[in-house]
Amino acid sequence: MATMADVARHAGVSVATVSHVLNDTRPVLPHTRRAVLDAIDALAYTPNSLARSLVTARTRSIGLAVSAISNPYFTEILQGVEAGALKHGYGLLIADPHDDPAHERKVVQLLHERRVDGMIVAPSADPRKLVGYLGRHDVPTVFLDRLADGGPAPGFAFDQVCAENVEPVCHLVTHLAELGHRRIALVTGLPGLSTTGERISGYRHGLAYAGLAYDERLVVPGNSEAAGAERATHALLSLPAPPTALVTGNNAMTIGALRAVRARGLSVPADLALCCFDDFAWADLFSPRLTAISQPSKEIGAQAVRLLLERLDSPGRASRTVRLPSAFVHRTSCGCPEKGSDS
């Protein structure tokens, strides 16, 4: 097995120079770096990551804690995080907090005990214990998808990245209103999540913009899951004056809403126009094709890695919150004629 000394001899440089190339601990001239990298390839040299971590005090690993990893949206975020991490030579340790604040605190501690260099977390609806732990231990952290306040950890700076939520939902509501709908319902996500609150805000903005009154009976929690949305949709359709249009707060809830509509022998959009937040791979295969808001999920993951690496390099810098634009994907479940897809 080749050693660092073998690489140095092959490249005609010192062992220290090889170390600087591997660990990015000092600038190295481009032609020298190239010679070292060529020598590594030629000798099939594999760095000793344990030894490297002892020298640099870093393990070059990132802890990722996101719930519902099976959800296509979070799967794409995971792909973005993984691609960004690998690009910079980092590995991932992954845990699912199950949107449970107590479990969230435990899995983050387990990741921290494995000496990850930093964390990327999609926080639960009550992240106070999470923020408290991360703050006490000064763990470099980026929150993604959902935002969190500083909680009980004064002085703890964390970065955040998410998609725009308010304006896109406002767009869905005004689009339905322009089609003539006056009773537009919303199936919301898990109470307490920033995404839930912001999408409700967007819904209310859309109603106000369209000159429609807010009716609390038309806003029902689906708790971010298919079963909850199915129950919520049945409740909405059982109202004395049921909605003629529906906005769902995420892709899982869209599935639940469609199940409820089918169970009642109704159809979309003839009996109920439907628009959804979160596009997904097979949304274009439904009949009708689903009008949706598409979030830049892979870019959210990649941006989270960039923010975390910046935090590792500059621990004292001010915290940042990055919002990425979402896109309106116009299909036919809203009741519009077939036009293909645009955004």
Image (cartoon, helix red, strand yellow):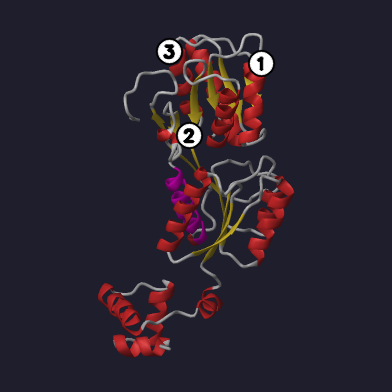
Residue shown at 46%/17% (left/top)? 176
Q: Nearer the viewer, mark 1 or mark 2?
A: 1
Q: Quadrant of residue 16?
A: bottom left
Report the residue marked by disc 2: 164
Of the image marks 2 and 3, the number of the one nearer the N terminus: 2
Q: Tell me, yes or no, whether the highlighted magenta stretch contains residue 169.
A: no
**Three-letter amino acid code at the position of disc 2:** Glu
Q: Which residues are magenta?
A: 297-312
**Three-letter amino acid code at the position of disc 1:** Ser
Query: Mark 1 to mark 2: distance in Å?
Result: 32 Å
Report the residue marked by disc 3: 179
User: Magenta stretch mostly in which secondary structure?
Assistant: helix
Q: Residues within 10 Å of mark 2 (few under 14, many from 20)?
A: many
Q: How many callouts does the rendering have? A: 3
Query: Mark 1 to mark 3: distance in Å?
Result: 23 Å
Query: Mark 2 to mark 3: distance in Å?
Result: 24 Å
Q: Quadrant of residue 288?
A: top left
- Are the two marked residues, 2 and 3, in contact with CB atoms closer than 8 angstroms? no
Report the residue marked by disc 1: 238
In this view of the protein, which residue sits in the foreground, 35 or 196?
196
